[in-house]
Image (tube, helix red, strand yellow):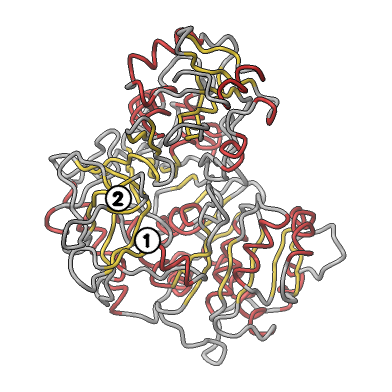
Amino acid sequence: MKRPASNRSAAKTWLHALELTAPIGANPHRIFPVVIEELADKLGEAPALLSDRECLTYRALAERSNRYARWTLEQGIAKGDVVCLFMPNRPEYMAIWLGITRVGGVVSLLNTNLTGPSLAHCINLAAPKHIIVAVELIDALTTALPHVAGTAKIWAHGVGHDEFPRIDRDIERHPGEQLSEAERRPLTIEDRALYIYTSGTTGLPKAAHVKHYRLMQASHWFAGMMDARSDDRMYSCLPMYHSVGGVQAPGAVLVAGGSVVIPEKFSARQFWNDVSRWDCTLFQYIGELCRYLLHTEPQPHETRHRIRMCCGNGLRPDVWNDFKSRFRIPQILEFYASTEGNVSLFNVEGKPGAIGRIPSFLAHRFPATLVKFDVAKDEPVRNEQGFCIRCAPNEVGEAIGTILNDPSNIGSRFEGYTSIEASEKKIFRDVFEPGDAWFRTGDLMRRDEKGFFYFVDRIGDTFRWKGENVATSEVSEAICAFPGVKEANVYGVAIPGTDGRAGMAALVAHDGLDLAALRTHLINRLPEYARPLFLRIQSELEVTATFKHTKNGVVRQAYDPAATGDVIYFNDAERHAFVRLDKATYDRIQIGQTRF
């Protein structure tokens, strides 16, 4: 029988989340691996983590993690020592980091899409004593090893590679029962558990410190927000090296006694078949995942499911209603948060396009605000006294959250990265009074009269052209609203002899895209300064594993037709049309002979 969508009021949802997280600080020795032990004693053979490759009950998950804990002790891994984990999605993934962190080790969750120097950079940030690698990723790891500092011992997981010792075989020597008092190390929620990396969409990733309290806070808070229960089953296809796919989604459902389905990767074609086949009631999304699903051909199972709610972030206004209607989603819980940050917003009311709001009775616990930001100077606007200026309703500014060291409000902290310099760059000081400190989200938002926040753009993505700020997200939404356009990545490019940056869009479209109609569409939707000057047609856009568009390559190549095999069009003001950009036209632009 289908469980109905929750009809709880927004206030009850917030209060339920507070109820679940309130005991965390009062019992500092109860860390997340301990919670899994408790659940194993209580639920035993109930399903916990499920996949086509392997399934783990609560008891099996606890036993498996205990074997990894004893392996950690045997290897002499001290409290705070790091083990890198390089493995695709699977239930075993969580068992590994649960076991290692249970006895004080820190697990660095490596992006499985990285190779060579980029992968080596992430490994070097963590300075590990050991690296655990799935056999299918050994070749990728090998490309990084010449650039890796230190002498970490490498362990292979799986069959088919004899160069390194097999950890999956080695841990079978260890018993799976609960650790004895002599084996347990004194840990609290203040101890470090994981390194989780930023996405690196515009630069190399940074390794964020994740303490045990953040694991507890994220899992229990989202359990309250989703009203997770033992009869829930979450479909989680996001990468487990990410905080959403690896901690929040599985953790929230597990602490409620439910189960989590973990496919190895996202597949738009298989998504609804999997959701139906596994009888899921919840799924976790990233906004672009929803856009991909909307572009698939209709499938029988896309409405034959028991989904009561989907939870995630980045669902854009141009997708929201169509997604909810086509796939018959009863409730969408959009939120805003980051792995390392202290600004969290939740759209409990389900208002399309909003990323959340902070109820007045909780404003003291979630002290986030927006401050005016000068895009051209890349810094906040300061008044004559040198302090930042709060934004008025519907005024765009950077979202910031005050940094506190309050034991009763652990979510207000900022633990930073392995790099002290990178950590300091995320802090605004002397914001509203001397000596105060606020976390920089790096995101531009606006807040309406009713207190709902809306994402505008990433700082660095917004650019200035003809004296005006251009939000790439706004331009992308306008382009994607045109029939035939599947997705778009918008960015600014420098043109010799001009101030600011001109708009350019890399886009994927169906064959036969009507450029004349697209140009008219953009004229009707966007002011002149925001309309892209260049279009680059691609077969697919480069994205991270969490479907964020990467801009490094396309920004570097800009609009030079010789730098790419993709077709580039120029929005020619004299001909009132998008025209194919050839070398002659490019050269005229470069020497200032073209009017914009």
Identify the residue at image location x=59%, y=45%.
263
Quarter in which the N terminus is drawn: top left
Q: Point out the frontmost of discs 2 and 1.
A: 2
> Is residue 117 shown above or below 191?
above
- The answer to the question of whether label 2 and label 1 lie on touching residues, with beta carbons closer than 8 A, is no
Task: Give the camera-side residue of 241 and 284.
Answer: 241
Residue 425 position in % (x across, y down): 41, 63
Task: Give the camera-side residue of 320 and 570.
Answer: 570
The CA distance from mark 2 to mark 1 is 14 Å
Residue 66 position in % (x across, y down): 59, 75
> Is residue 275 shown above or below 407?
above
Identify the residue at image location x=52%, y=69%.
194
Q: Which residue is mark 1?
A: 341
Is label 1 in a helix, a strand or a loop?
loop
Residue farthest to the bottom, as pictured: 182
Identity of the amino acid at label 1?
A: Gly
Residue 506 position in % (x across, y down): 54, 28
Quarter in which the C terminus is drawn: top left
Identity of the amino acid at label 2?
A: Glu
Q: How many marks?
A: 2
Q: Which residue is mark 2?
A: 398
Identify the residue at image location x=18%, y=56%.
383
Identify the residue at image location x=39%, y=47%.
459
Q: Is residue 434 left or right of residue 121?
A: left
